[in-house]
Image: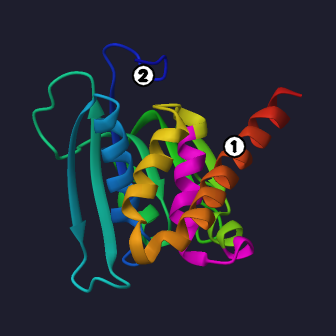
Amino acid sequence: MNNYFSTHMTERIILAGFGGQGMMLLGKLLAQAAMADGKKVTYFPSYGTEVRGGTAVYHLIISNDEIFSPIIEEADTLIIMNQPSYQKFKEMLKTDGLLLLNASMIKSNNFHDATVYKVSATEIASKLGNVLVSNIVMLGAYLAIKKLFPPALILEQLQEILKGKKGNLFTINKQALESGMHVIETMQHQSVQ
């Protein structure tokens, strides 16, 4: 296999944002890449009452071991796209967990004991030419931080999902993934200096 995921590791992730911000696609991409990498996966997507504009939440567990419930009571990682989702799910993050925030839409500085990365995903996606790829910017950032598996696995899944009429969207999604990774690499490089 690879050295990305240690032998007995379980990663519990909650992805949350407005309906239409691509949380379901983000969760699906992570789940499919993990399965392609031989991991065990459970996922539990849920939507608010009104799909577009309501809250979209995706519980995802990736593990090398059996997973007994798809529901997450305490998350290792929160990937949050907007302020209402941050308010709603921040208490579900374990102490010393990873909090990955879309800084374009979340204005908060009172974080509890977490490793926090603020990525201006909406802004980055907008500069790439399509605000809808902000979820993929966040995915790139997450992969650069956690290194669960090689980015190539995500790109394979993206290519599979974006074939046919959506094939022209692959390039911008690839750029979004790389941009998210680059933001984290830059942050990590600056913190070392």
Viewer-nearest residue: 126 or 78: 126
Q: Tell me: 130 left or right of 164.
A: right
**Is residue 177 covered in magenta?**
no
Highlighted range, magenta: 126-143
Residue on which disc 2 sits: 5
Point 73% across, 49% down: residue: 183
Q: Residue furthest right?
A: 193
> What colour scheme governs how the chains and residues are painted in the rendered image of this protein?
rainbow
Identify the disc placed on residue 184.
1
Numbered disc 1: secondary structure: helix
Q: Residue furthest front?
A: 164
Residue 149, compared with residue 151, is above or below; it is: above
Question: Given the image, on which type of amino acid does mark 2 rest?
Answer: Phe
Residue 168 is situated, as x and y percent measured from the top left of the image, at: 55, 73
Numbered disc 2: secondary structure: loop
Residue 148, compared with residue 78, is above or below; it is: above
Asked if residue 127 can be seen in this view, the reply is yes
Asked if residue 114 can be seen in this view, the reply is no
* Comes first in the chain, label 2 or label 1: 2
Viewer-nearest residue: 112 or 120: 120
SS assignment for the magenta stretch, majority: helix
Residue 119 is situated, as x and y percent measured from the top left of the image, at: 65, 56
Number of the front mark, 2 or 1:
2
Tell me the CA gap for discs 2 and 1: 19 Å
**Is residue 133 covered in magenta?**
yes
Q: Tell me: 98 left or right of 43.
A: right
Q: Quadrant of the N terminus?
A: top left
Q: Residues within 10 Å of mark 2 (few under 14, many from 20)?
A: some
Question: Given the image, on which type of amino acid does mark 1 rest?
Answer: Ile
